[in-house]
Amino acid sequence: MAKGVVVGTAVVVCAAAAAVGVAVVVSRRRKRSRVAEAGWRKKASDVIEEVEQAFATPTPLLRGIADDMVEEMERGLRADPHAPLKMLISYVDNLPTGDEHGLFYALDLGGTNFRVLRVQLGGKEKRAAQQYEEVAIPPHLMVGTSAELFDFIAAELERFVGTEGDDFHLPEGRHRELGFTFSFPVHQTSISSGTLIKWTKGFCINGTVGEDVVAELSMAMERQGLDMKVTALVNDTVGTLAGGIYADNDVVAAVILGTGTNAAYVEHATAIPKWNGPLPKSGNMVINMEWGNFKSHRLPRSDYDIALDFESLNPGEQIYEKMISGMYLGEVVRRILLRLAHDASLFGDVVPPKLEQLFVLRTPDMSAMHHDTSHDLKHLGAKLKDILGVANTTLEARYITLHVCDKVAERGARLAAAGIYGILKKLGRDRVPSDGGPKQRTVVAVDGGLFEHYKKFSACVEATLADLLGEEAAPSVVIKMANDGSGIGAALLAASHSKYTVVE
């Protein structure tokens, strides 16, 4: 019996010892886990601090960037071959006044879809009535021949013309006139002619590069038996400017902030040294800046931006666009999150494989995460699950992701505002008159899904511009959303450059 007691005691002692051992192991693991967690948090903190410093855009820096924008604009207007801003002459010197009358068409070709539009202009008393249709381009036509593509477009135009209703009237004896928005690189030679430099956006068509795109479309319309003449070839940004001025005579510039970015503005013809022709009657000329290619040593480019540019299809080009446009903002966020996943285990011990994929995080997704106001950021967490395949993210990881979105969007918006401020400086619209005269109202028309739908981005653009302008000048400057400005703008430019008398 005593033996049994001893054995039992031994069992109890062994069990107690084992329990102590387990407790020690668990304690050590918890300690190691706490140490590891502290290490990850420190690494995450270091990365975030580095991002905050690299993406900082203090107001003095933005003023310097705006000054550089003005300098590069002037170099481009002088035709300096080394100027990053080409400052393309649009040949648009007659902008809509609101007095135009008549029926006009527009064709907007800039991607895998194109739009056809018609407007009936009735002067100031009766503003534009319009109809439009959007047509998808069959994939095989994007890699076919020039004749096949333009024949398809002309056939759709003819079909659309055939649906004219009673609200649209073509005066007797007139041909239909068309404004052609062509959003591909073109060397423009007049208001209604321009040779294609290269196809982009997935198009690879034989026989068009180096040819006049207006002539290509015109021949296709002739083959189709369509009695229509192209009277204006315009870039989408120039079209947005025309549409903006039609709605508000105080518009002086237009900016596209969407998947890509660009700006156009009204310049005094005498301020364009490279203009060799006779001065236009209006005294003005619209300049297509192609500002996405703006460069400045002051631009706060981070390691993430440099790597993105190096791995892009056009390294060294479109530097400004890669920092402010919808095509790239989400990708910059992805690269920062990938660094945090590798260095600080932001999403657990294993880096989500999807996070390694280029452009897997789109800017609309970034915007949706950035606008999550729930206390636990559940919508942001759902996005991370859908996009990256991370089933369970910690609240800390979600807040870090939100902060990264905020920094990237803020930098992009503030840099965009600096560009707008630069244009206003070039035009002398950045300050109140020094002679004590009345304040001049200044409007900038903005189009693009990034500005329209990413509310925190657009609010930051407006607040930053007001800060740069200062208390006196800011109230006289307005940013105005110009929805679908490029479409109606092309039709309006067809009207203002019509061979008929359309201003009554």
Image (spheres, grey):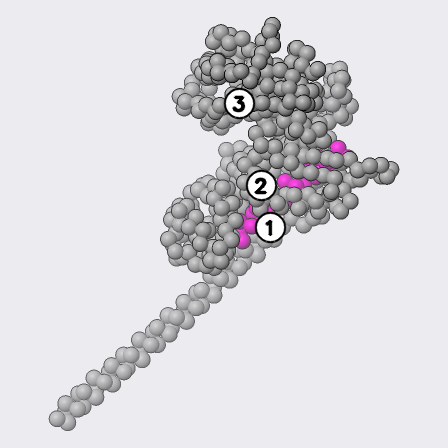
Residue 253 in percent (x, y) is at 68, 31
Which of labels 1 and 3 is toward the front?
Answer: 3
Q: Position of residue 455 (x, y in %)?
A: 57, 44
Q: Nearer the viewer, residue 32 or 446?
A: 446
User: Which mark is drawn over residue 121?
Assistant: none
Mark 2 vs mark 1, CA separation in Å: 13 Å
Q: Which residue is mark 1?
A: 54
Tell me which corner region of the image, top left, top right, bottom left or bottom right, holds residue 358: top left
Where does label 2 land, which residue? 323
Instruction: Indicate which label's residue lies in the foreground, 2 or 1.
Output: 2
Q: Which of 263 and 64 lies nearest the eye of the viewer?
A: 263
Q: Give whichever of 433, 3 is nearer the camera.
A: 433
- The residue furthest bottom is 2
Q: Amino acid at mark 3?
A: Gln
Q: How far apart are the alpha carbons under marks 1 and 3?
A: 47 Å
Tell me the quarter of the image containing the N terminus: bottom left
The stretch in magenta equals: 403-428
Which residue sits furthest left? 1
- Label 2 close to label 1 by CB (< 8 Å): no
Q: Which residue is mark 3?
A: 131
State whether the magenta stretch is mostly helix, strand or loop.
Answer: helix
Few, some or many C-alpha atoms within 10 Å of disc 3 (few <14, some 14-19, many ≥20)?
some
How packed mark 2 is, by other alpha carbons closer than 10 Å (few <14, some 14-19, many 20 or more), is: many
The reply to whether residue 352 is visible in this rendering is no
Lateral position of residue 48 relative to residue 204, left or right: right
Query: On the rendered image, what quadrant is the C terminus found in?
Result: top right
Q: Amino acid at mark 2?
A: Met
